[in-house]
Amino acid sequence: MKHLLLAGVCFCILGVAVSTAKAMDQNIYSFTMKTIDGQEKSLADYQGKALLVVNTASHCGYTPQYASMEKLYGQYKDKGFEILAFPANNFGAQEPGTNQEIQMFCTTNFGTTFPLFSKISVKGEDSHPLYKYLTGISGFEGPITWNFNKFLIAPDGSVVARFDSGTDPLDAALVRKLKEVLPKG
């Protein structure tokens, strides 16, 4: 009986180790997402670029950051940079609209040209696997605290920095870190 119990414990530990190893092999390029217009988009299509991944909302005190995001995008998109915006309604019901309404809001009010994705959950049990990865095993663990949390991704897919909601996308520290990871060449 002791041998069976010991074998069961070893099997469980091995299972956790294999699961952890698979998770460690995962990076942002492992995910396929839906664009704001419902098309499947592999994030591997962005491999080799620096990325800023942001959970967004249309009715938030930080919503004006869309303007800063667009300005940052305009300055660095030709240098191998993309912003990936993921609308979410997790905080104060500040993103109640449909994907079509969100897209119209962003383009009409802020002239956004960076990629917008379909609305997802970024916190809790129903959190999208991308955000489970970003907040769980990316090296920058911890729950999303509010709208406009930002993850900076290097061209190799590794998460290299995380910025809270209050950090404007044009903040000197964020821009400095972005310049460090822009593709060379």
Image (cartoon, rainbow, N blue to C red):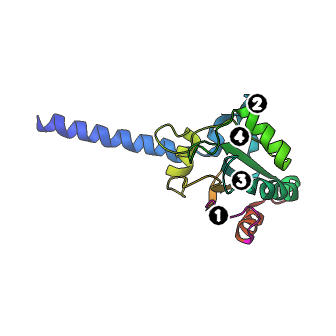
- Residue placed under numbered mark 3 in the picture: 63
The quarter holding residue 76 reads: bottom right
Report if residue 167 lies within the magenta region: yes
In whole angstroms, how far apart are the C-alphas of marks 3 and 2? 21 Å
Q: Amino acid at mark 2?
A: Asp
Q: Nearer the viewer, residue 51 or 120?
A: 120
Q: Residue at x 67, y 43 (%)?
A: 86
Residue 5 shown left or right of residue 50 in the figure:
left
Q: Main secondary structure of the magenta part?
A: loop
- Residue placed under numbered mark 1 in the picture: 166
Report if residue 125 lies within the magenta region: no
In whole angstroms, how far apart are the C-alphas of marks 1 and 2? 29 Å
Residue 59 shown left or right of residue 9 in the figure:
right
Q: Amino acid at mark 3?
A: Thr
Asked if the residue under mark 2 is in contact with the one under mark 3, i.e. CB atoms within 8 Å, the reply is no
Q: Residues within 10 Å of mark 1 (few under 14, many from 20)?
A: some
Asked if the residue under mark 4 is in contact with the one under mark 3, i.e. CB atoms within 8 Å, the reply is no
Q: In the structure shown, which secondary structural element does the residue marked by tag 2 occupy?
A: loop
Q: Nearer the viewer, residue 52 or 30?
A: 52
- Whichever of labels 1 and 3 marks the residue nearer the N terminus, that label is 3
- Residue placed under numbered mark 4 in the picture: 44
Magenta region, residue range: 164-172
- Whichever of labels 3 and 2 marks the residue nearer the N terminus, that label is 2
In whole angstroms, how far apart are the C-alphas of marks 3 and 4? 28 Å
Q: Nearer the viewer, mark 4 or mark 1?
A: 1
The quarter holding residue 62 reads: bottom right
The quarter holding residue 107 reads: top right
